[in-house]
Image (cartoon, rainbow, N blue to C red):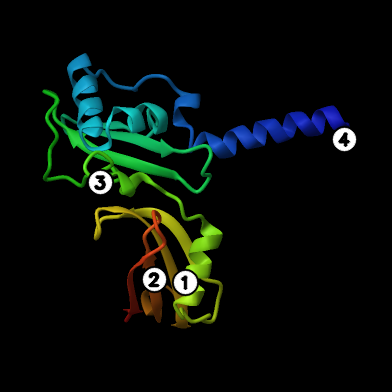
């Protein structure tokens, strides 16, 4: 394989891998009709929580995963911070055709930067989060820790979540497991919670 072919294949594979993150790179419109009012209201809804500056810099429409469901719109966006590769997260909520957010459906991923700026200061990277968990005494467990930067519906904010598995047996319907988890504030590294978990 020549160097030129290798580089071409690398670029294609990379674009496919990162395409799921940078949805705006793949498409520039929805697959369904959506009014300017709905688009504007959706944008303003997010900006109302994040502020315009954070929205403009870090939030992009996800045209691929957005869809029309039973006469409403399930709208998806992505939060991306190129300088922090662990921040590649999903925003989603549902609006009706008049552009009103339907709060009976799940709303996820919109950080409240406007009222609490520290909720958008993601200063702790994965390596630091792992070290914080180790210093806090999270047990090693029987397999590698599962580490994720993600939205928490429980705390209504982004967190570092580190899961330790101490016991595991069975498959699918007979699966049982237990362990510990630690939840870390990505702004300052403080521990939000450390607790046991169990699947019976």
Residue occupied by mark 3: 116
Residue occupied by mark 1: 133
Residue occupied by mark 4: 1
Q: In the figure, residue 163 lies in which quadrant?
A: bottom left
Q: Single out the mark in the foreground, 2 or 3.
A: 3
* Residue 165 x %, y %: 46, 78
Q: In the figure, residue 34 lies in which quadrant?
A: top left
The quadrant in which the N terminus is found is top right
Contact between labelled residues 1 and 2, with CB atoms less than 8 Å apart: yes
Contact between labelled residues 4 and 2, with CB atoms less than 8 Å apart: no
- Crowding at label 4, few (<14), some or many (≥20) Cα neighbours within 10 Å? few
Q: Which structural element holds mark 2?
A: strand
* Residue 78 x %, y %: 39, 36
| Disc 4/disc 3 C-alpha distance (Å) | 53 Å
Contact between labelled residues 4 and 1, with CB atoms less than 8 Å apart: no
In the image, which disc is placed on residue 182? Answer: 2
Q: Is residue 169 left or right of residue 43?
A: right
Q: Which structural element holds mark 4?
A: loop
| Disc 2/disc 1 C-alpha distance (Å) | 7 Å
- Crowding at label 1, few (<14), some or many (≥20) Cα neighbours within 10 Å? many
Q: Single out the mark in the foreground, 4 or 3.
A: 3
């Amino acid at each position: 394989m020549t160097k030129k072919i290798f580089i071409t294949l690398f670029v294609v594979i990379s674009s496919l891998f990162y395409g799921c993150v940078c949805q705006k790179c793949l498409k520039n419109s929805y697959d369904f009709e959506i009014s300017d009012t709905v688009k504007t209201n959706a944008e303003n809804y997010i900006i109302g929580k994040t502020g315009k500056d954070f929205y403009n810099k870090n939030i992009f429409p996800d045209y691929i995963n957005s869809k029309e469901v039973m006469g409403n719109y399930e709208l998806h966006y992505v939060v991306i911070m190129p300088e922090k590769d662990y921040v590649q997260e999903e925003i989603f909520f549902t609006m009706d055709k008049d552009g009103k957010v339907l709060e009976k459906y799940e709303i996820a991923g919109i950080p409240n930067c406007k009222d609490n700026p520290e909720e958008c200061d993601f200063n702790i990277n994965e390596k630091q989060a792992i070290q914080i968990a180790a210093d806090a005494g999270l047990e090693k467990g029987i397999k590698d820790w599962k580490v994720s930067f993600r939205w928490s519906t429980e705390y209504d904010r982004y967190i570092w979540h580190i899961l330790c598995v101490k016991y595991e047996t069975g498959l699918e319907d007979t699966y049982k497991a237990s362990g510990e988890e630690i939840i870390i504030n990505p702004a300052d590294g403080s521990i939000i919670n450390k607790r046991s978990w169990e699947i019976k």
